[in-house]
Amino acid sequence: MNSWADLYLPPIDSDFSFPALSLKDSASKKVVALPVKDVYRMYVCGITPYDATHLGHAATYVTFDLINRYLRAMGKRVHFVENVTDIDDPLLERAKRDNVDWKDLALSQIELFRGDMSDLHIIPPESYIGAVESIPLVVEAVTALQGKGAVYQVDDDLYFSVKSDPNFGSKANLSRAEMLELSAHRGGDPTRAGKHDALDALVWLHGRIGEPSWPSTFGDGRPGWHIECCAIALNYLPVNHDEDFLIDIQGGGNDLLFPHHEISASQAAVISGKEYARVYVHAGLIGLDGEKMSKSLGNLVFLSKLVAEGANPLAVRLALMSDHYSKDRMWTIDQLDQATRFLDRLRLLLSRPEVAPTRDVVQQLINAISHDLDTPSAINILKIWCDETERGSTGGSAGELSRAIDLLLGLAI
Ligand code: ZN
């Protein structure tokens, strides 16, 4: 599937020093430094295309874009893969509710998403892969799981047995009761009769009358959600046999940690015999007026709507970076106003012929981002530079700072 237009990343002076990137790993609950190497592999879970792109999505993709930018600024190669779940129950339910064809709904929302990602200056993935186009890969992955004795049948549907992975549960570290509750709320079916374990996950749903299905060696049907991401990651991210992990970074919003990432990781581990991701990185959720932003509450704020109302999408990006990515946080219009004013101030000062020294500022920005994407500190560093420039300090290069802000923070100003 086509992604969106690539972005120019301005070079910065090779004299700057780039510390190893550290990130908060949800599995170990620690901030860990990624080993310094030439190639990184990052898989980020994409949208189900029926309500693109609300600010929770935007915050997630900005987070992984910051990772991508930092590693690329270090001169490293980043294999970045993202999926789009263009067939799943929520998409079919929304299409039915709105009396539209599910394919048309998906196509229109994917197109909207592409535009939103471009507006936010998100570097596109190398591989942007739909669930429908990856069905042969899912069939292959399910067959591989069958070969390991990890799949069983309930009626005509196929399930992955979580007990086939001895490390199942090690990513989210939840109690059994918590896992059961989250499974029920996040697309699982823990109460279905006939399952060996309530947490076992659907990998192949036998075709239902009136719903789309595709032929396979298991009969007509469609893929489960977790196996979709597992199959795409296994096929589109290159394996390095010298490494202990299949990929480096598994990312998404923190509502994906369980069951989605836990089960995808188990499936990949059972198929490959290797641990899945080196780190599991999760962006916090964005709330509104003291409440979680969710489709069920009907309080989603959409990027395209803000832009249609006159917001600068890069001010939205900056506002989302004003707090740490890993925190659940509230969205306020005041944040957007502040970010808009700060972008204007920065743009004005960067156009001055004389500006405050920039060399240390760029190094400080690099250091802040290297430390678990500390964007609040990065913004503060820029504010201090603005103050100094306004006080008449000179000796810096506006071009140097401008390029670094674009390269590291994705703010082309
Ligand atoms: Zn996923």
Image (tube, rainbow, N blue to C red):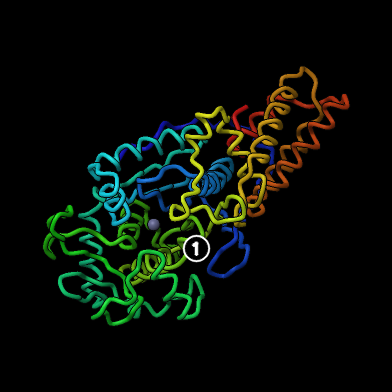
Q: Residue at x 49, y 32 (%)?
A: 119
The residue where tag 1 is placed is 278
Q: Quadrant of residue 153?
A: bottom left
Percent position of residue 336, x then y: 64, 37
Percent position of residue 346, x then y: 72, 28
The front one of 160 and 19 is 160
Using residue 202 as the reference point, say whether residue 68 is left or right of it.
right
Residue found at the very far top of the displayed protein? 353
Q: Residue at x 76, y 34 (%)?
A: 359
Q: Residue at x 82, y 25 (%)?
A: 395
Element on which disc 1 rests: strand
Using residue 381 as the reference point, say whether residue 148 is left or right of it.
left
Q: Amino acid at mark 1?
A: Arg
The front one of 373 and 395 is 373
Percent position of residue 225, x then y: 32, 60
Q: Quadrant of residue 149?
A: bottom left
Q: Is residue 76 visible?
A: no
Tally of marks: 1
Q: Residue at x 42, y 64 (%)?
A: 261
Question: Dividing the image into 4 quarters, which one contains the C terminus?
Answer: top right
Q: Is residue 84 above or below residue 141?
A: above
Q: Is residue 34 above or below residue 74?
A: below
Q: Is residue 39 visible?
A: yes
Ligand 1 - quadrant of the structure image = bottom left
Percent position of residue 82, x then y: 39, 48
Using residue 261 as the reference point, say whether residue 223 is left or right of it.
left
Neighbourhood count class around disc 1 (C-alpha, 10 Å): few under 14, some 14–19, many 20 upward: many
